[in-house]
Amino acid sequence: MSKIPLTVAGAEKLREELHRLKTVDRPWVIAAIAEARSHGDLSENAEYDAAKERQGFIEGRIQEVEGKLSNAQIIDPKLLDADGRCVFGATIEIEDQDSAVVVTYQIVGEDEADIKVGKISVNSPMARALIGKYAGDIAQVQAPGGLREYEILDVRYE
């Protein structure tokens, strides 16, 4: 399996989720299964079926998170020396050439992406258009509404 890029914060968030799944969610679902079993006939026991389904989801998510962490390539944006180039982990301030709206994004791994807090996936069309560019360059992004142009105003590693 190929390496999965993660920022330090993204890796920590996954570790916290894994810890919660193993120490809170897993014991809770085991107790729920035991409680449902105590109600008798399992063939028509909706609580048992729901608890078993939840257990399957939790165990699957534990495996998924463990796999991602074991294949993670953790990158600390503060330690990057990319000479002002847009790279994974960089925080980029861009201006839409049509509307003059200025936005700031950080390029992060897929699991960390959250547009509401300004984090875009390294695999998104926007990030792919920005990677390798410098402040002052124009990035062209193929958006659903057509080709958009953005000027890169600033590149930071924070």
Image (cartoon, rainbow, N blue to C red):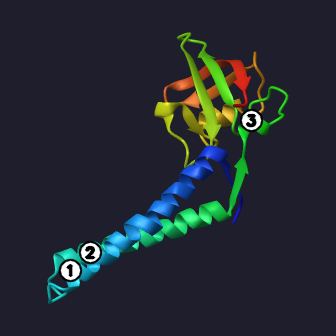
Q: Are marks 2 and 1 in contact (CB under 8 Å)?
A: yes
- Splitting the image into 4 quarters, where does residue 47 fall? bottom left
The crowd level at tag 2 (other Cα within 10 Å; few <14, some 14-19, many 20+) is some
The crowd level at tag 1 (other Cα within 10 Å; few <14, some 14-19, many 20+) is many
Residue at (15%, 89%) from the top-left corner? 41
What label does residue 1 carry, if any?
none
- Splitting the image into 4 quarters, where does residue 112 fall? top right
Q: Which quarter shows the C terminus?
A: top right
One can see residue 52 in this view: no
Q: The residue under label 3 is which amino acid type?
A: Lys
Q: Position of residue 8 (x, y in %)?
A: 66, 46
Residue sticking out furthest to the front: 23
Q: Which residue is mark 1?
A: 36
Q: Which element is circle 1 on?
A: helix
Q: Mark 1 vs mark 3: which is more N-terminal? A: 1
Q: The residue under label 1 is which amino acid type?
A: Ala
Q: Is residue 25 above or below residue 142?
A: below
The crowd level at tag 3 (other Cα within 10 Å; few <14, some 14-19, many 20+) is few
Q: Which element is circle 2 on?
A: helix
Q: Are marks 3 and 2 in contact (CB under 8 Å)?
A: no
What label does residue 32 carry, if any?
2
Q: Which residue is mark 3?
A: 78
One can see residue 73 in this view: yes
Residue at (56%, 10%) from the top-left corner? 100
Query: How far is the residue under mark 1 from the one under mark 3?
Result: 50 Å
Residue at (27%, 79%) from the top-left corner? 33
Q: Which element is circle 3 on?
A: helix
Given residues 18 and 1, the one toward you in this image is 18
Q: Number of callouts in the render?
A: 3
Q: The residue under label 2 is which amino acid type?
A: Ala
Q: Is residue 114 above or below residue 54?
A: above
Q: Mark 3 vs mark 2: which is more N-terminal? A: 2
